[in-house]
Structures are given as C-alpha cells and as structure tokens.
Image: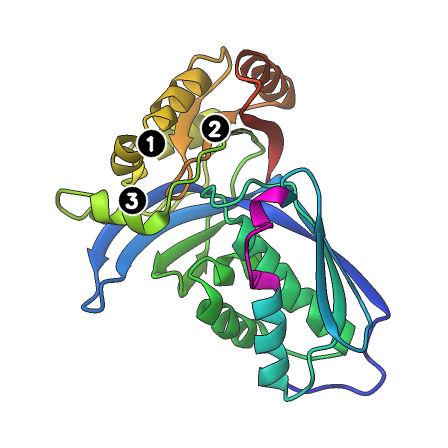
Amino acid sequence: MNRPADAAAAAVELFAPAKVNLTLQVVGRRSDGYHLLDSLVVFAGVGDSLLFTASDQLSLAIDGPTAGGLAAEPDNIVLQAARLLAETADLMPRAAISLTKRLPVAAGIGGGSADGAAALRGLCRLWGLSADQATLEAIGLRLGADLPVCLRGQPTRMAGIGERLEAAPALPPAWLLLVNPRVAVPTPAVFKARQGPFSEPSPLTESPADAAALARALQTRPNDLTAPAVALAPVIGTVLAAIAAQPDCLLARMSGSGATCFGLFAEQPGAAAAAAAVAQAEPGWWVTAAPLLA
C-alpha cells in the first residue's frame, strides 16, 4: 500500500448496500471451531451511507432511522476499520465520519460489514491511499468474515470462512422484499444450535434466464441455518410465512443467520405491493423492497 502525492480527496460519500445470502450451506468446521460455508451472496439497493471528510482527529457521528441500535456500541466497526487501515498504511487515523444507518443491526444482512467495507474504500480515497483488492480483503477479513465479500459488492460465491471468493454467474433482474421482525439473533448461538450432518457444496454454476429460473435454482440450495434460527426465534418462521403468502413471491428464505428474511420477486410492482401489505399487517417490523444489484 502506498500514498500517491496529491491524490487525497476533500470529502468522500459512499453507499453501503445490504448483503443478502441467497443460499448458505454449512459444509464443514475447522479445528479452531470456525464453520466452513458455501454461499451465494448478492447485494440489494437499500443500505447505509457514509460521508468522510478531512479532520485533525478520528470521529464518528451516527444518525438515521436505525441508529439507536448502535447507541451502546463502544467501538463501531467503522472506527476499527479506520484504525486498522491507518496502521497498515503507517499514518495517523484522521477523519470525520458520518454514518447514516438505515439497515437494522445484527440482522443477517451484513449492515456492519457493509459499513466497514465502505470505510476502507472511503478512507483510501480520503487519505490518497492506493490499495489493491487483495490487500483490502485481507484487512477486511481481520474485522469480520463478511467484510471481503462486502468489499466486492457484487454477486459472489463465498466459501471457507469468507476468504474464498469468486464471481457468481450473471444473475437476471429481480427484486427483493426484505423483512426483519426487529429481533436480534446472535450468530454464535445459531451456529451452536445447528444439528445434523454438513451439506455438500452445490454452487450455482449457470446463469438463470429470469427471476423464476433463479428461484427454481435456489430451491435446492437452502440456508442451513434456518432451522436453528427459528428454534431460537420462532418469529422468523412467522416472517417467512408472511413473505411466502404474498401473491407474486417466487421464493421466501432467511438471509445469513437471521433474523432478516427475503422474498424474491420478478418485478418491482410485486415487491412493492408485498412490502406495503406486510408493513400494514406488521407495523413493528422493518420492511422494504429493493432491487437485486447485478
């Protein structure tokens, strides 16, 4: 990593999209206890935003509709990313960062990881740093398993503990209904509650022709963490049923370790109508419709 002369930006603003696990298979476990995964990860057109401006010290201000979920967090991942990047580049971490939080916290859609990834990219631009993708992904993996894939921000097959990434086949246009019952489900507890044998990896290898074909391909590639997550938080089952009941829903599934679930739709009107119906029936839930970002 180096620092080109006069390359720093005065201010940088980045979007941090929600990460959605269309599939998530648990395929093994390492000797150190970390589980090995095989997952098709995509990103949705809804997320947080971050603004980075020059400053003589490092600071973070948080606002937005879900900012309250971070109120008790002593060291946000954005600050961790800033310090680790500065340490790697051998410079002082100086930046004023504003985070507008729209994604629910601890929700299985990588909100924190997306914020951390945006911090690494945004601060590289603010500080005039030149870092290749591999370097940033190595830094990101020290912060969390989902950081490397969030740095890519495009449909990706994620394997291992998050460090093995390869481009997914091209995906068709589609829309996602995202629903979270505002219940936090700790990831370690979900993995601990999981029972049964490990799955055989079955990655998507061909490009589906349309959203319906994508849904059919996903049917045989489940999320292995759904059953333990539902056992810990039965409301997840209620969410899945509410999504599946929507007229144009092609597939209803949980993302990550929960509790956010998604419905796959072919077009925006169906997803928007479903979002309106679920929000009206369950006003306490977090509900949104967003395009799948290809």
From mark 2 to mark 1, how far is it between C-alphas? 10 Å
Badge 3: how crowded within 10 Å, few (<14), some, or many (20+)?
Answer: many
Instruction: Give the tally of numbered discs.
Output: 3
Do the numbered discs 2 and 1 sit on residues whose CB atoms are within 8 Å?
yes
Residue shown at 56% from the left, 16% from the top:
274
Q: Position of residue 268 (x, y in %)?
A: 64, 23
215 in relation to 33, above or below: above
267 in relation to 2, above or below: above
Q: Nearer the viewer, residue 222 or 278?
A: 278
Badge 2: how crowded within 10 Å, few (<14), some, or many (20+)?
Answer: many
Q: Earlier in the sequence, mark 3 or mark 2?
A: 2
Q: Which residues are magenta?
A: 68-78
Residue 165 in view of the camera: yes
Residue shown at 49% from the left, 63% from the top:
148
Report the side of 72 relative to 58 (left or right).
left
Q: Which residue is mark 3?
A: 190
Q: Which residue is mark 1?
A: 233
Do the numbered discs 3 and 2 sit on residues whose CB atoms are within 8 Å?
no
Q: Nearer the viewer, residue 149 or 185?
A: 185
Which of the 4 image quarters holds residue 87?
bottom right
129 in relation to 168, above or below: below
Hey, what amino acid is under mark 3?
Val
Hey, what amino acid is under mark 2?
Pro
Q: Position of residue 267 (x, y in %)?
A: 60, 23
